[in-house]
Image (cartoon, helix red, strand yellow):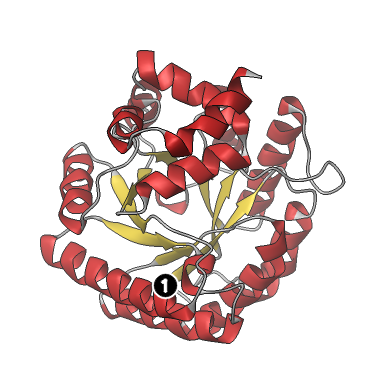
Amino acid sequence: MLSKIIANLLPYMPKSLVWQFSKDYIAGETIEDAIEAAKKLNSEGIMTTIDVLGEFIKNLDEAEANKEEYLEVIEAAEKAGVKGNYSLKPTFFGLLIDKDVAYTLIREVVAKAASFDNFVRIDMEDSPCTDKEIELFRKLKEEFPKNVGLVFQSYLKRTHQDIKDLKDVHNSETPLNLRLCKGIYVEPASIAYKKYEEINEHFLDDIELMFKEKMYPAIATHDKPIIEGSYKLIEKYSAPKDSYEFQMLYGVTPALRKSILDNGHRMRVYVPFGKQWFGYCTRRVKENPQMANVILKALFFKG
């Protein structure tokens, strides 16, 4: 009940108050903020993936503007020598309005990154987007085999098969680069696992499939059992240090992040920024009121 109350009240709270528990998890509003945060992480031996906050736009004029912002981000980050790549949400480019327009705009972003021999991660959004985003990825992968990756969510019952189905675009020279996370969207039990242990079990099954097929897994988690399970899989498959990476969110579990680095593994941190941070935060909590528990903790406990 308390979570639902907070979720409903959050959009009406002063931005300055919401920022107090958001600032540790969002790099800022400007490109300069994102680059400063990324460079600081780089100095600690951590790679980054920069993301402009925003999704589910209402018109294609917004999509064009978002594309231009991403091109600017890539230009500025490459000029600054940031060691990292870029992430984007296809609905930020109008995927649910016109998928062909979205593809054209996202292709420009990937081409820009490719011109610097860099990489763009296509984020996976809620279930109505899944097929569209896999289709988008396939099309981009064909033209930019080394410069584009995809995200999957272990709580979706279809994920293991979806990974298998992409084997036709996977080879030793340009292996599939797949980020696996648990999943944040609220989905029905008919298509998504709900129990913690169940989600974790399938997470590790999916990671093992990637190691077995010699794909490049990006293990996105803050969960110690999954990290320990991943260590065992790395040992089981004698995976070289450059054949996988761990990923975490900006500002979350820094001590655990450091322990992974200290164990000699690659680490990448997701660096979100942008003027739409307030709408992003409030929408996320409204979609999933249980996230209000995270807000309460963030007010009192850092990391």
Residue 254: give x, y in percent of width and height: 34, 26
Q: Nearer the viewer, residue 72 or 242?
A: 72
Query: In the picture, which quadrant includes the N terminus?
Result: top right
| Residue 16 visible (yes or no) | yes
Q: Is residue 137 left or right of residue 42?
A: right
Q: Is residue 41 left or right of residue 3?
A: left
| Residue 225 visible (yes or no) | no
Residue on which the image places disc 1: 147
Q: Which three-letter amino acid code belongs to the residue tagged 1?
A: Asn
What residue do we see at 84% from left, 41% from top?
189
Q: Residue furthest right?
A: 190
Q: Secondary structure at mark 1?
A: loop
Q: Nearer the viewer, residue 295 or 154?
A: 295
Residue 271: give x, y in percent of width and height: 33, 47
Q: Is residue 55 left or right of residue 20?
A: right
Q: Residue furthest top?
A: 300
